[in-house]
Image: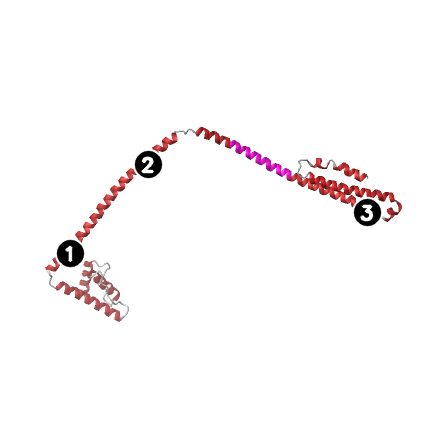
Amino acid sequence: MSYRDLRNFSEAMRDLGFPHHISLESFRTPNWELLEVCLRWLAARVEPDAVLAGGRETLEQRVALVIHAIELFEIRDRALSRPLDMRAIETALTRAVTSVGERVAVVSEQIDSVAASESALDAKLERRRADLQRAEKRLLTVQKIKPAYQGELTSLEEQIEELWEQYELRYRCVEALKHQLSLLEKAQSEAAEEQQAAVMQLIHKYEAEDLLPGKLDHSGASGSESRAGFLAGRDSLDDIRDEDDSQSDSDFSDTELFAGNEPKSRHDNDA
């Protein structure tokens, strides 16, 4: 390209509104990148939906790009050079005007329907506001009026509170008594076990005295006394067991339970 061609091309592209600056030195050497951008931009101005084939990577793509662009521009030139048919143009314009009028009518109907819906919604909102105000007034009236059974209800609530306090107190007392009863039963069982162990010790002692050979030979009277002590200890153990069974559910303390047994056991030991 000559200097004049480059200048005219850059000025024409600038007048058309090309977004990039084209300098006079842009095409001193083959610049396929800028050429592709210019051709695709011009094709989009001629036909927005046009897509040029080819590219700038290989020789075949470059040839296809240039050929396709030239064909597109030639088709445009032929279309512009063809004589215009005024009847066809008028018919097309009439159809376009009719289509636009129909669209305007549809939009107008939509606007009217929206306005009617808006007025209906406004009326509905007003009714709802009036209902809400009436309901609030009724609520205030009901809150101010004291029902006839209000006094009785208040007295019953006070009675229920008192009964609940009594129930709590009695429940706590019952739980405390149960705890004391469990402690008493435990103490009674421990005392009975201790007494039983003491009686068993006496029994083993008497049995050991009876089995001594020297005492059997020299003192028959002492052996009979030992047997009598053994029998008395066994009877005392039976009495203790019977008394524990009969008094397991009573309310006596440990001292009351075993006070009567201590003298008897001491008497048995003396015997």
Q: Amino acid at mark 2?
A: Leu
Magenta part of the chain: 161-181
Q: Amino acid at mark 3?
A: Ala
Q: Is residue 262 above or below residue 112?
A: above
Q: Is residue 247 left or right of residue 60?
A: right
To which residue does mark 1 refer?
A: 95
Q: Is residue 126 above or below residue 44?
A: above
SS at badge 3? helix
Magenta span: chief secondary structure: helix
Expressed as whole percent of the image width and height from the top left, the position of residue 152 reads 46, 29
Disc 1/disc 2 C-alpha distance (Å): 55 Å
Q: Identify the image quadrant of residue 257.
A: top right
Q: Identify the image quadrant of residue 151.
A: top left
Numbered circle sitting on residue 132: 2
In front of the other: 145 or 248:
248
Numbered circle sitting on residue 208: 3
CA neighbours of label 1 inside 10 A, class few (<14), some (14 to 19), many (20+): few
Q: Is residue 50 left or right of residue 208?
A: left
Q: Is residue 242 above or below residue 35?
A: above
Disc 3/disc 2 C-alpha distance (Å): 103 Å
Assign the C terminus to one quadrant of the image. Answer: top right
Q: Amino acid at mark 1?
A: Arg
Q: Is residue 85 left or right of residue 64?
A: left
The verdict on residue 177 being magenta is yes
Look at 79% across and 39% down and name the residue there. Answer: 268
In front of the other: 105 or 170:
170
SS at badge 2? helix
Q: Is residue 1 visible?
A: no
CA neighbours of label 2 inside 10 A, class few (<14), some (14 to 19), many (20+): few
Of the residues under marks 3 and 1, which one precedes in the sequence? 1
Assign the N terminus to one quadrant of the image. Answer: bottom left
Q: Identify the image quadrant of residue 47.
A: bottom left
